[in-house]
Structure formats: C-alpha cells, structure tokens
Image (cartoon, grey):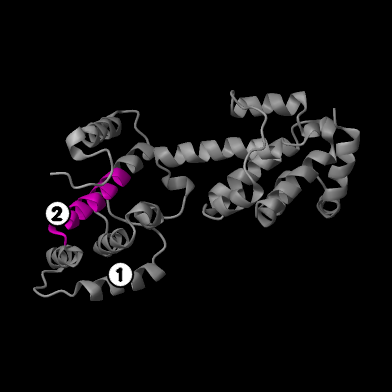
Amino acid sequence: RDLGGPAITVQDGVCGVLEEVLTAMLTDRSAQAPHERTWRNYRLYTELHCDRRAAEITEDRDACISALVKMETGLKEVSAAAYVKQAEEILLQEKSGSEGVTHPEMFLRAWSLQLWSEDADTCDQLMQPLIQGPLALASLDLLQQQSLTDFTRDFLRYLLQPAWMQTSILMGHAKRYFEDLSNGPGTSSGAAADFLRTLDADLRRYFCFVLLDFATCDPDLEEAGIARAVLVAQDMGLADVFAKLAADELKLGRRTLQRIQKNAESIVRQAETELAP
C-alpha cells in the first residue's frame, strides 16, 4: 500500500543498509564519540518516523499518542490533547535535547506527532533542536561536524574577502585549513550571526580563535589584521567573546588593544588604501 511520505522508504532497503553501516562504524575499534552520537541520533529519529507511520496507517493521531502514553505509564485512560499540552509546557523549560539512547522521551514523541500533523514539511526541522539540543562541541555527530566544516570554510571566505587580506601568507595559511578554499563572498554576516547564536560557548570560542589565528598570522599587516578580526567579530555577534580572548592571547598591552578596537574601522579603511594589491 502506498502511504505517501518521503521517497526513501523501508521497502527500498536504504534505511536498513544505513543502520548496518552506522552499527559497523560504532563497533569498529577506531570509533569515536561522533560515531556513537550519529548512531544514537539515527535511532531516535527512526522512532519518531515509526510513530508517524503508525499515525498514517490508523489515521488517528490522538489514538497513537494515547497508546504511547499508556505503554509508558500504565494508565488505562489518557487524554491526548491534555498530554500534548503538558508536553508543550515541558518544552518551554527543557532546552538540552533528548537524553534517550534508542527512544526519545515520551513527551518528545507526542510533540513530534503534534507538529507532524500540523505541517509534515517542517516537522523534522522543528524537532532537530529538541532531539539533539544546541550544537555543542562535546556532542557533535558526523553530520553536524560536516555542517561546521562547511560553515568554517564560508567563515574564512568572509574574513578574507577584502583584497588586502588576501596576502600570500594568509592565503597559504587558509589552505592549511581547506586545501580547496577558493575566493568568494562566503557567508553573509547576518546569516552567520544567526547560526553562531545556536552554538554553545566552546564552539563560539573556536571561531574566535580562528579570527585570532588569521589576525596575527601575517606580521606585515600589523594592526590591520587585528582590526579586521574585530570588525568581523562585531558583525557576527562574537565581539564580547573575541575581546576577552584577544586580551588573554595577544601579546599587546591593554591600552593598545583598546585603541585598535576603538579605531578598527579607520584602521581597515587605511589598509584598503595602502595595502590593496
């Protein structure tokens, strides 16, 4: 029977193959935390999609929610609407993501069915932060690692966008990050700031360290490289974190650093005139 839904179905065998691949990675001696996290997240999402398939077959979302809660609690009578309301109240306080290993918490499963019944196209996107929590350095899975790698590449393109920043030293250093790095506009500052706000403190510090790395890599740029990093940090909502790291890491006096921060725009304008190729 054709139940609709995505093109990749259980009948295609793709999901089964994927689970076998993830399990094989997890049992390999060289497996690391991201492999385990990827397997875990796959299992959690699989349960959510199984719940949806049950709702499609029965054509009764509330009955599925009630059945889930009855299995969890042993109650004989359950109001699906009341439980969904309770789940919503829990989610207003709970921001850390699921703690489940193979099954999400029951309130997340109920809320997923609620979102799916309202808009199947946006459900997965809305559930992702509820299942996985905020992007955190200690709990990245393989897909999140790839997303951060892609963002870092665009982040560097944005940082190196001014022609005077594209010195042989800086571009050579950038190639050590990404051998295939090419010139381009990179990400927009607004989109980058929105993304960076979803990261935990460790990942935000990581991007500030990237800024510091390039700010001081080419000594010929002198203060201009630091000034450019200051402005990028301001554009992307990292100003406070960057300022603290710069004060701790750079071999500059406090007054010198404060002067660069205060005059960053004029220093960069001067660099555009004097250093542009």
Residue hosting label 2: 57
Three-letter code, disc 2:
Ile
The quarter of the displayed image where residue 27 is located: top left
Are the residues tagged 1 and 2 within 8 Å (C-beta)?
no
**Residue at (44% x, 42% y) in the render:** 144
Between residues 249 and 96, which one lies in front from this camera angle? 96
Three-letter code, disc 1:
Ala
**In the rendered image, the vertical position of residue 174 relative to residue 259, given as above or below:** above
**Residue at (34% x, 70% y) in the render:** 88
Between residues 215 and 150, which one lies in front from this camera angle? 150
Location of the N terminus by quadrant is top left
Instruction: Look at the magenta stretch and give its main secondary structure.
Output: helix
Residue 141 percent across, percent down from the top left: 40, 41
Query: In what element is the residue under mark 1?
Result: helix
Is there any visible trace of residue 67 in the rendered image? yes
Residue segment shown in magenta: 40-59
